[in-house]
Image (spheres, helix red, strand yellow):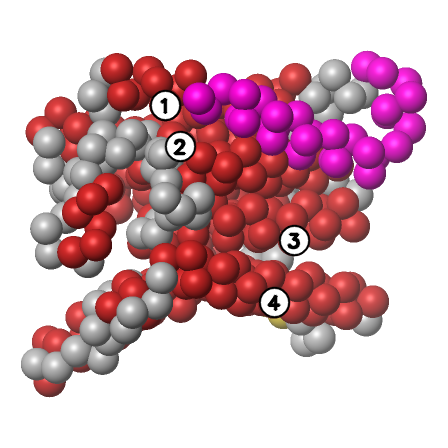
Amino acid sequence: MFSLIPAIAQYPTYQVFLAAVLALVLAGAMFPFWIRLLRYRNIGQQVRADGPQGHLVKQGTPTMGGVLILIVVALVYLSGGVVGKRGLIVLMAMLACGLLGFIDDYAKVVHERSLGLRPRAKILGQALVAIAVALAAVNWAHLNPHVLVPFMGTLDLGVLVSTFKIGTFSIEVPWLYVILVWFMVVGESNAVNLTDGLDGLAAGSVMIVMLAYAAIAFRQGHLEVALMAASVAGACLGFLWYNSFPADIFMGDTGSLGLGAAIAAFAIVTKTELLLVLIGGIYLVEILSVVLQVLSFKLTGKRIFRMAPIHHHFEMKGWSETKIMVRFWIITGILAGAGFALYIAGSLNR
């Protein structure tokens, strides 16, 4: 679409802006119909009884909004006419983990309980996606298995490589890099899933993170990646109109797992793997709060937080959902902005 119109093709910045706007408008227009369909099919959220008691009123709220988010992103990106291997790797990771989340959501709806897939099955599925992303990045997109360390140079994770022959094709497996990608995809998808516990929290934070990756990709000259990031940001913003407190719909695991994997994939294809710790810092805080809570209880019998993930801790202290959401957005913006600034500073020194 963008590349077929000469007037638009001359201005890549406008193309990125247009992708975000199209995704926003399309999501905003389609979600009312999607919400009606979910209500008609009685596809609603199953709330955990051991969670915050204030969340019990959300029982039955339509879920699986992530299905439409991923569809909108795929439609806008693929119809844009500027498609590349790096962008397709991100799209593959997002849709694959989104499918895993869909299976999880469907199991919850069918069995009418808050627990879906077993944790081992979910981790196994995410691991397979991570391996596919790593191998596609190295063998298909021809990205080197090096990790950029800001202001220090590069770390070669391709020193331990195995080569496998499949017919006329050779597949290189840089084991250390595959392990790193595994941690990134599995960790980030689960971290965003944990963050999706308050109305608007996950969607708003993902939108902010996507803007940072769109800027990084645009700076690198990878327009197809910038368009993909802009499409995700626009779709999340369109969804946020209906997901803001009090939410009319939740994204479910379909959205949170898919978007989390997309964030990790963006870090991989832009070669900013280590900056993910800063740009996606809010998700690191969320998942670490759970880890620390579990370790503390097992080792000492005491809890560090009133409830984990940490956004529930503040909720138990009496903060409103809106207050937590907005403050977490602000923190996300600061961290994402700092990550982009660090990337710019590091690139200027190279």
Res 230 visible? yes
The kind of residue on which mark 4 rests is Ile
The kind of residue on which mark 1 rests is Ile
Mark 4 element type: helix
Closer to the camera: disc 3 or disc 4? 4
The kind of residue on which mark 2 rests is Gly
Q: Which residue is mark 1?
A: 35
Q: Quick one: label 2 or label 3, which is nearer the N terminus?
A: 2
Q: Quick one: label 4 or label 1, which is nearer the N terminus?
A: 1
User: Dots 4 and 1: beta carbons under 8 Å?
Assistant: no
Which mark is drawn over residue 349? none
Q: Which residue is mark 4?
A: 334
Q: Residue at x 47, y 28 (%)?
A: 70
What is the C-alpha distance between the residues marked 3 and 4?
Answer: 11 Å
Q: Is residue 151 magenta?
A: no
The kind of residue on which mark 3 rests is Ala
Q: Which residue is mark 3?
A: 212
Q: Quick one: label 1 or label 3, which is nearer the N terminus?
A: 1
Give the image location of residue 38, x and y in percent.
Answer: 30, 21
Q: Which residue is mark 2?
A: 66
